[in-house]
Image (cartoon, grey):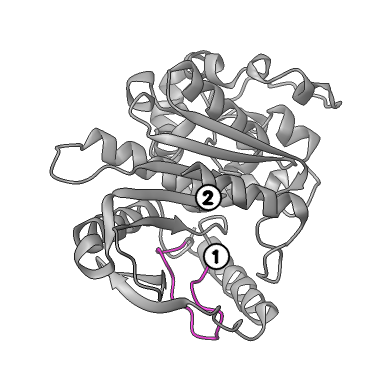
């Protein structure tokens, strides 16, 4: 175990080093924008705020970066300042705990320090950050007491929402499409969960979920719930053979440590029960056609819509995972992305 952890640490450190240098020099600050690095509840954050005065309270957004729960920085210099703790050094729920601490701090100081209405704060994120946004929304909803403002809305950009089924059409249709490959998605989930890569093939084949739970989740994860056009592109669903994980007794006794947390809603928000999902605020979801995570977003949209939640879904038919930010960290300014940004901003 420790040998595997050390190898993962070395690989991740090298990847982070390469990504930092690929970004290059920091971009100049746009006129009318002030950027500050601060600490919110003990968590490093970067604050973007307009310099122009406002005669009314502003809207605010807490944005959680992507990077497979393993990478990401709010700094484009050699010195990294992480928004939340990262795997493999830290495992679930450390990332979510940091997001909660920072968000609750911002709620408490939003009006006094930033002129932001705490009741008009949106949670958002891309990829793993979308997962954290959805999970945090559910955590806060379950803790709701009236003393702390609730998020006004969610913005989920190609979010990763479940680790129960890696054989959905989008996972099989796009398994070899960059920037996120199917096996790499499972790798990131497992690194976030506990770092045990010996079970990766079991997870990819769907043999990590016991039969009764698989039946329970099927009403939410059935490909038949997808619009027909997303099932038309050819793919072959692998045969799921019986394994040592098929028995509930064996699953709890031998593998419960590895997978139990991965199937709870704070790790896999798409698997939350209806009474929890009904508490979701207005939500905007963006998906991309050539993305293994496409169906997570589409199925989440369907569940929210069926439960009467105000939800808007925007699909980029020629998009791929990471379209919002390319591999060098600069925004891709295609017409479709510009249109998507405008739609997202105007919606809230």
Identify the secondary structure beneath mark 1. loop
User: In the figure, 297 relative to 45: above or below?
Assistant: above
User: In the figure, 185 relative to 313: above or below?
Assistant: below
Numbered range of the magenta stretch: 72-86
Q: Residue 3: horizontal and vertical position, in percent?
A: 53, 65
User: In the figure, 172 relative to 321: above or below?
Assistant: above
Q: Residue 321: horizontal and vertical position, in percent?
A: 70, 49
Q: Residues within 10 Å of mark 2 (few under 14, many from 20)?
A: few
> Which residue sits at x=76%, y=46%?
319
Q: Residue 274: horizontal and vertical position, in percent?
A: 38, 19
Q: Residues within 10 Å of mark 1 (few under 14, many from 20)?
A: many
> Which residue sits at x=55%, y=22%?
302
> Which residue sits at x=36%, y=51%?
96
* Pick the front one: 246 or 91: 91
Q: Is residue 196 left or right of residue 146?
A: right
Tag 2–tag 1 contact (CB < 8 Å): no
Q: Quadrant of residue 117?
A: bottom left
Nearer the observer: mark 2 or 1; the answer is 2
Q: Earlier in the sequence, mark 2 or mark 1?
A: 1
Residue at far right of view: 234
Magenta-drawn stretch contains 84: yes
Magenta-drawn stretch contains 168: no
> Which residue sits at x=49%, y=45%?
155
SS assignment for the magenta stretch, majority: loop
Q: Residue 71: give its label.
A: 1
Q: Is residue 69 left or right of residue 91?
A: right
Identify the secondary structure beneath mark 2. helix
């Amino acid at each position: 175990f420790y040998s595997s952890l050390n190898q993962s640490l070395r690989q991740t450190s090298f990847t982070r080093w390469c990504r930092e240098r690929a970004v290059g020099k920091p971009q100049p600050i746009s006129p009318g924008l002030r950027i500050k690095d601060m600490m919110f509840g003990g968590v490093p954050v970067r604050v973007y705020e307009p310099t122009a005065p406002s005669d009314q309270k502003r809207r605010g957004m807490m944005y959680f970066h992507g990077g497979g729960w393993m990478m990401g920085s709010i700094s484009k210099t050699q010195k990294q300042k992480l928004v939340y703790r990262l795997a493999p050094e830290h495992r679930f729920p450390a990332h979510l705990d940091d997001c909660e601490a920072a968000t609750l701090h911002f709620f408490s100081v939003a009006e006094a320090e930033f002129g932001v209405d705490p009741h008009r704060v949106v949670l958002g994120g891309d990829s793993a950050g979308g997962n954290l946004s959805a999970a945090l929304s559910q955590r806060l909803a379950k803790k709701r007491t009236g003393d702390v403002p609730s998020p006004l809305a969610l913005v989920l950009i190609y979010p990763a929402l479940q680790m129960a089924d890696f054989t959905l059409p989008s996972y099989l249709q796009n398994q070899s499409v960059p920037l996120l490959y199917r096996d790499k998605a499972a790798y990131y989930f497992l690194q976030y969960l506990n770092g045990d890569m010996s079970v990766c093939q079991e997870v990819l084949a769907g043999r990590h979920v016991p039969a009764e739970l698989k039946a329970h989740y099927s009403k939410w994860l059935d490909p038949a719930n997808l619009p027909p056009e997303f099932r038309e592109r050819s793919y072959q669903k692998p045969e799921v053979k019986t394994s040592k994980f098929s028995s509930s007794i064996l699953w709890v006794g031998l593998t419960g440590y590895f997978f139990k947390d991965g199937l709870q809603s704070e790790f896999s928000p798409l698997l939350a029960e209806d009474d929890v999902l009904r508490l979701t605020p207005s939500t905007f979801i963006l998906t991309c056609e050539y993305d293994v995570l496409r169906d997570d977003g589409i199925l989440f949209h369907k569940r929210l819509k069926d439960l009467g939640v105000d939800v808007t879904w925007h699909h980029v038919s020629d998009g791929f995972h990471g379209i919002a930010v390319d591999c060098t960290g600069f925004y891709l300014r295609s017409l479709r992305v510009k249109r998507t940004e405008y739609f997202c901003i105007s919606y809230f």
